[in-house]
Amino acid sequence: MGVAKGVVLAFNARDSRTVPARAMSEYKLKFEIFEGPLDLLLHLVKKEEVDIHQVNLTKITTQFIEYIDLMRVFDLDIAGEFLVMASTLMYIKSRELLPVEQQVVAEGEEEEEDPRWELIRRLVEYKKFKDAAAQLQERESAQEHIYPRLPGKPEFAADGPVPRAPVSVFDLVNAVNSILKRFTTQEARDVYEDKWTVGEKIESILTLIQTRPVLKFSELFVTATTRGEVIVTFLAMLELIRLRQMVIDQPEPFAEIEIRIAPPETLAESAPDASMPIAMENAENISPAATN
Amino acid sequence: MELKNILEAVLFSAQKPMSPKELQELFALTAEQTEEEIARALKKTKQEAIATALEELAGEHERAARSYRLVCVAGSWQFVSQPEFAPWIRTLVGQKQRPTRLSQPALETLAIIAYRQPITRAEIEQIRGVAVDGVMQTLLERDLVEQSGKAEVVGRPSLYSTTPEFLEYFGLRSLEEMPAADELRRITVQKPESLVTAEPGLATAPPEVLAEADINQLTASPAVAASERENKG
């Protein structure tokens, strides 16, 4: 892989070369991983404790090559970049040995760039990015301690229609009671035979709802002429809800109850019978008199 | 009721960081949905005005030295807790879900891209002195950098830039907020007039000569800097 790494072992002893092999284990080994030749060079400059521009490149060259030798001793793969840097350093060193007038000027270049300067420029540049990386690292770990304020999702969904209010059994009882009030006076004097069955009313509600997507609760009863008819209609509606043919809800709490055809997706989840445990197995047989 | 108070209330309840643009849209929508006079007056609030009010608000919170502050990350504003309260918040909400920390080579490469973008792989390798294939792979996979075009040179190599995720990951408002951005963006270190060899050995120019050269760094355009680097190589 492309990531070149040189592992360098630095002994605490003054001169590692004099250390007998058998005694090596007694010495504390310090592992340093260098990201590349520039990283190693920077490390060597730092060890000299002088300004990067003042560093004695002869000394650094010697140390750099010593490190490469060490890497060889420890049988580490020496990345090509390290060898390129070693040769650059050697070139600088050899060039310095010649008097200025004898220094070779490469063909095609009027004035050759001083290789020392080029190297130092690269080192300074690299050092700055290394420092920048360290600052990024600080920010990275600082971010782990910063928590954003995340308020809980509001109770009402931010988008989409406001959910409609469910209808309780008491709401239904209240609603049907208010309809029945219309007939309290008439009930006393008129006696009818049962004109309507729950089955018939189911049919008529279904026909009605086919033509109108939403029915108001009271609209179911506008045609009702007797208390008995209201009750039969009411039972028919309950039966249709139980069979999940229709759903009832309110646009908002305390608004009038509305009746709609059950949307297909709510067939499974909207279980109105949970809130309305009304058994209507014998709905057909319930006579208005019985519910009175 | 001032603009900044409204912004404070909105950001306090916001589910995600919000940019001045989003806030502007919110003002326009609110004006349509309400009869409230102030809301109508704020209908056409400029983004600049929102940004200014947010800065002001952030400054107020800063001076009040609260346990939280208003910050702008990648152009969007949100309330965050101060880092010193992390131990208690951690107990409350658990460790922050963050990917593993970046390695040293990855951070170095990322720093180079961040300051020099758009930049080619070869230019990065030139600065780091080593190949960056593996590291680039990691950075691309983590969406911290992306391909942002092709360089107008032979072979048309890809150019790389940082992403908004980079700013988010490091909690940076913008690339300008990075430390020493001016200095690092395009270092074109000038060669001093003459290199003074201080001693007969291989010591290089005295620091004052080179320091001066450092000061004279120019902020050149990418193309110029690239060509300069080519000339030097």
Image (cartoon, rainbow, N blue to C red):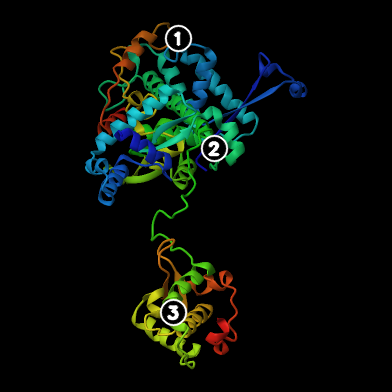
Tell me if mark 1 has few (under 14), some (14-19) or many (20+) residues whose alpha carbon lies within 10 angstroms of its own.
some
Which chain letter goes with mark 2? B
Q: Which residue is mark 1?
A: B201
Residue A215's spot in the image, x, y percent? 38, 75
Residue A270's spot in the image, x, y percent? 52, 70
Q: Are marks 2 and 3 on the same chain?
A: no
Q: Which residue is mark 3?
A: A185
User: Disc 2 vs disc 3: Cβ atoms closer than 8 Å?
Assistant: no
Q: Up-down: is B50 above or below A177? A: above
* For marks 2 and 1 on the same chain, the one whose residue lies earlier in the sequence: 2
Which numbered tag is attached to residue B101? 2
Q: Are marks 1 and 3 on the same chain?
A: no
Cα distance between the residues tagged 2 and 3? 82 Å
Q: Residue furthest top?
A: B199
Q: What is the quadrant of residue A221 in the picture?
A: bottom left
Q: Nearer the viewer, residue B127 or A98?
A: B127
Which chain letter goes with mark 1? B
Task: Tell me the amino acid under the disc marked 2.
Answer: Arg
Which numbered tag is attached to residue A127? none
Of circles 1 and 3, the one toward us is 3
Residue at 34% x, 82% y: name it: A211
Task: Tell me the amino acid under the disc marked 1.
Answer: Gly
Task: Tell me the amino acid under the disc marked 3.
Answer: Thr
Residue at disc 2, secondary structure = loop
Residue at disc 1, secondary structure = loop
